[in-house]
Image (cartoon, grey):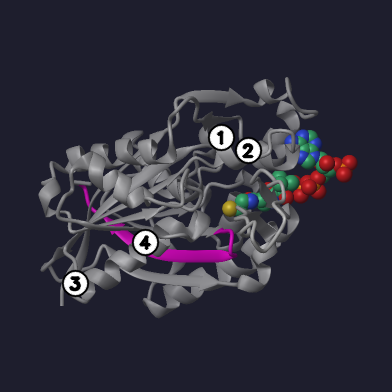
Amino acid sequence: MAYTKIISIDYEVAPNIVTNDDLTKILDTSDEWITTRTGIKQRRVISGDMTSSDLGINAAKKAIKRANFDVDKIDLIIAASSAPEDIYPSVACIIQKAIKADNAAAFDLRAACSGFIYSLNCARAFIKAGIYKNILIVAADATTKYTDWSERSTCVLFGDGAGCAIVCADDKESDDIIGVDLMSDGNCGDYITLKIQGVNSPLVDEIKTKEKPFIQMKGKDVYKYVMTTIPQKLEELLDKLNLKVDDIDYFVPHQSNLRMIDALAQRLNIEQSKVISNIEHYGNMSAASIPCAIREAIDKGQMKLPATIAISAFGAGMTSANAIIRLNEKI
Ligand SMILES: CC(C)(COP(=O)(O)OP(=O)(O)OC[C@H]1O[C@@H](n2cnc3c(N)ncnc32)[C@H](O)[C@@H]1OP(=O)(O)O)[C@@H](O)C(=O)NCCC(=O)NCCS
């Protein structure tokens, strides 16, 4: 059976910076409120004709270049993209075309902000089953296109970016994707929604004006959901792998709210120096947030490799996911 090797991680963020002070020009809010409740100081926002796929393409090109990887060897592209510009073609196929990965199959995976870890688990399963060998995962979303900029409790939270990882089959007897646990609870589906509405045929119904698709969120319910699922499930995963919290060198949770990140670390007894967070600069970049936080922490020297890392994510669905991964020096 093959083993999993993560050979590259990279990211791209949208070019425009929107600060909390900028938001006060269009909203009844303040830097103080946003900073205290979320830890966010600024976010990256897409503009013009740029799309989430463009962010994904740039992140993919960087990850491929970093590993000096032969594009022709990529046999699968998974795009963890939950709010794409178009339903089809898929973001994965758009990226495939742009990077000329002509030998790859490509599909999108929708698990909202948990999408990167869901994709890692998919990659792991395909590699273990011997189906694919070199898998490009791209988490790309331009969520700010779907936020209601007059709704202060949601629009302050989000930012646009893409994160990428290349996962390959390896015969060395150890896995970089050590263990993954995925959860979903459709009963909590109304906590975060983004509705796109098709219209019925005019032959059977009157045409109704479509509402603009915007993210709606029950912030307090999301908060509770995260606190009641992530710590317990991560502890169970560590147990299953015969690991202890102390064996974890770094904890990289989904970057959605600094208060949540701190509360999770506290609940899990993970010391502050091991917790990686960059939400202050980017806001919640959906599934891109974990690969982006990892790459940035490595580049800044905050994360020393090799390291064993716990990553945790949660998002619309509701979905949530924990994984323990190993990253080597050459990433
Ligand atoms: C969104 C979140 C920051 C709101 O914080 P909260 O403490 O729950 O705040 P509330 O929604 O109870 O609002 C408290 C007050 O602040 C106000 N408020 C909301 N957003 C505001 C803003 N940007 N600026 C100023 N005031 C704001 C509310 O209107 C409310 O006022 P009221 O008491 O007069 O009604 C918080 O619930 C949260 O982060 N939840 C998790 C969301 C998340 O991570 N989602 C993504 C998951 S992938």
Q: Position of residue 254 (x, y in %)?
A: 51, 52
**Label 2, label 3: how far apart the Cα atoms are:** 42 Å
Q: Nearer the viewer, mark 4 or mark 1?
A: 4
Circles 1 and 2 in contact, beta carbons < 8 Å: yes
Q: Earlier in the sequence, mark 1 or mark 2?
A: 2
Q: Is residue 325 magenta?
A: yes
Left or right: 49 as drawn, with respect to 227: left
Q: Earlier in the sequence, mark 3 or mark 4?
A: 4
Magenta stretch, residue numbers: 315-329
> Of the numbered discs in the image, which one, if any, rests on residue 280?
1
Work out whether 225 lies above or below 45.
below
Q: Earlier in the sequence, mark 1 or mark 3?
A: 3
> Of the numbered discs in the image, which one, if any, rests on residue 119?
4
Q: Position of residue 270 (x, y in %)?
A: 51, 57
Tell me the crowding category of disc 3: few under 14, some 14 to 19, or many 20 or more residues within 10 angstroms, Cα based.
few
Circles 1 and 3 in contact, beta carbons < 8 Å: no
Q: Earlier in the sequence, mark 4 or mark 2?
A: 2
Left or right: 149 as drawn, with respect to 68: right
Q: Is residue 30 magenta?
A: no
